[in-house]
Amino acid sequence: MTLTILAIGKKKSEYDPMIQEYKKRIVAPFSLELEILEPLGIDNTEQCRIKESEKLLSKIKKGDFVVALDERGREYSTAEFSKLIESKLNESFKRMVFVIGGAYGLDENFKSQANQIIKLGAMTMPHELARLVIAEQLYRVTNLISGGKYHHV
């Protein structure tokens, strides 16, 4: 299953080398992709949120399991998160897409179309750091699913 991080934001980040390292460590049946879309830079907050969400929606494929990352989403422990991903693997999803909105987040239309809404934690963090955090957690849970020793429960 392909695990895709789809985000609005800066194309280059100081966290990119660490994300690439996690990407290399993920083993079959999983792979990790990162797709970054340029922010639109619209001054109107709501208009920007709507247009960027539309841009993100255009990258979603039929049959994807879409996870929106949002501060009002459900919080998972690593063990719970691994069960969610393993269940989608067992349901034969080919791709899970983890979506990070732009500076103003995701609009309600996007969130209503997502299969799941989760949060990485209660604290606010830069979007580039959120990409690293989700990449690390995806590595951690895929390692756990494949019987590795990276996570001690």
Image: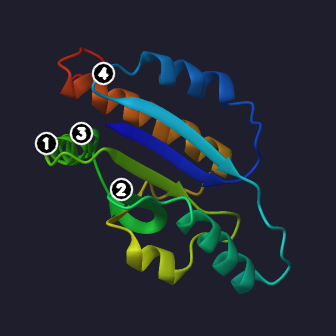
Between circles 3 and 4, the one closer to the viewer is 4
Q: Residue flagged by tag 3: what amino acid is it?
A: Ser
Instruction: From the viewer's perspective, tell me whether residue 105 is left or right of residue 118.
Output: right
Of labels 4 and 1, earlier in sequence is 4
Alpha carbon of mark 3 to alpha carbon of mark 2: how far? 18 Å
Q: Taking 130 as reference, is 122 left or right?
A: left
Distance Cα–Cα, label 2 vs label 1 = 14 Å
Q: Using the image, tell me which numbered label, if any, was put on residue 90.
A: 1
Q: Earlier in the sequence, mark 3 or mark 4?
A: 4
Q: Nearer the viewer, mark 3 or mark 2?
A: 2
Q: Which residue is mark 3?
A: 82
Secondary element at image label 2: loop
The image shows residue 12, relative to residue 130, as above or below, that is above
Disc 3/disc 1 C-alpha distance (Å): 12 Å
Whether pointer 4 and pointer 2 mark residues with C-beta atoms closer than 8 Å, the reply is: no
Please tell me which residue is depicted at 34% across the width and 19% down the height of the picture: 27
At horizontal 44% and vertical 74% (from top left) the residue drawn is 111
Tag 4 secondary structure = loop
Mark 2: few/some/many CA within 10 Å (<14, 14-19, 20+): some
Residue identified by numbered label 4 = 28
